[in-house]
Image: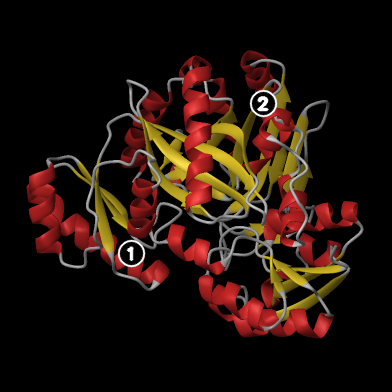
Amino acid sequence: MYQKILIANRGEIAVRIIRACREMGIETVAVCSTADREALHAQLADTCICIGPERPKDSYLNMEEILSAAVSSGAQAIHPGFGFLSENTKFARMCIRCGIDFIGPSPESIERMGNKSEARKTMIQAGVPVIPGTEEALTDAAEGKRLADEMGYPVMIKACAGGGGKGMRVARSSREFTDLFEMAQRETMQAFGDDKMYLEKYLENARHIEVQILSDKSGNTIHLGERDCTIQRKHQKLVEETPALFVDDALRQKMGEAAVRAAKAAGYYSAGTVEFLVDKDRNFYFMEMNTRIQVEHPVTEMVTGIDLIKQMIRISAGETLPYRQTDVSVRGHAIECRISAEDPERGFLPCAGTITNLYLPGGNGVRVDSLLYNGYQVPPYYDSMLAKVIVHADSREEAVRKMRSALGELVIEGIPTNLDFQYNLVSSSLFREGNASAINEELEKRYRKVC
């Protein structure tokens, strides 16, 4: 087992990884930008090394500085968290060349599943259902329009190297296709430095269901049930829960088995997530695989009792999974709400400033993963997520009540947040009914009105 791990990330996920390492008796090295010298992750780690100015490209995306920090500190492994360099094959390979373990899958698996069009081919070969769409990457809008006209509208335009909702547009007619294609292409170039796109048939009112998997380096692979991530704003998840109301036992088994096949086809080890779209007739289709830990991983931990961060570390160190599929059981219901520094009344505009008053909820079955403390200055350079409130109860009805109680207790003052927005969302009759499609329609109407 490792004696020292460097965390190549910031915010609540860096804090989460530091805490897991502490419980395992592993020393931690944090990296920070000049804007994050007083951040919680920088203060909690055993060692903190400043790696550059505030802009991500000069610090948290600076591969050479991060690796230099790892070598100089004597870290044996790097955990990338999510975002930043977590799915960067170049960085994973650089780690290997420097004799440092990358806590995640192999560069080859990241490459195979990170490119969306290549992932589709891999899934087709593995017998995993995929959404009808183009087989080859596209760079020309005219060619894309020709294929979309043949496929029939609506179609989803997606970036091959995309993620986090970047480079995605829904074209509902031939007339608007070219503008949307070029808009998505510019966005993916800015976010990922790649202009390759692909098309999928757009499934109206589909459920976004993802399956968590764990796989070790010996090929032992299990799934840990599904998460419903359908409630989203502009392709950004807002609320996640498990188990999914829409999924019955038969569908759950089929999706779990498909996720395991997908992981094996990719030669995958570590924690990963296979994302599916499920139509109204409960037909499911592979959408993508996230080759990293997910923001919403805590809900799976709450219902299974399995610590995914610790398992990632153990798998990276060469240990065999201590679980078989028959050992996995889901107990109760868990919900997660993302709390962000953004103003819902101003089109969810990201905000920065100083936290002047903070109170975090607690109690049985309540967990808060956060980067906050009183007096913390939220910088304007990074993702706006401040905290995740997670609850666990015996039933969904009780979990909904518990989430309302927890959000009602949570106090974050000094900057605008989406806290009241989330409280109203989980208090709505639509949420209690599990009507995610209607919620998304209301969110889209509200966003258009505000903007």
> Horizontal and vertical percent for residue 436?
43, 26
Spatial separation of the CA atoms under disc 1 and disc 2: 35 Å
Can you tell which quarter of the image residue 319 is in? bottom right
Q: Is residue 84 left or right of residue 19?
A: left
Q: Nearer the viewer, residue 404 or 169?
A: 169
> Horizontal and vertical percent for residue 39?
75, 64
Residue in the image at 11% along x and 61% along y? 143
Residue in the image at 60% along x and 51% along y? 385
Residue 271 higher or lower than 47, as above or below: above
In this orientation, does residue 238 appear? no
Residue in the image at 14% along x and 52% along y? 177
Q: Where does label 1 land, which residue? A: 187
> Horizontal and vertical percent for residue 124?
34, 47
Residue in the image at 64% along x and 83% along y? 97
Please tell me whether mark 2 sits on a helix, a strand or a loop: helix
The crowd level at tag 1 (other Cα within 10 Å; few <14, some 14-19, many 20+) is some
Q: Amino acid at mark 2?
A: Met
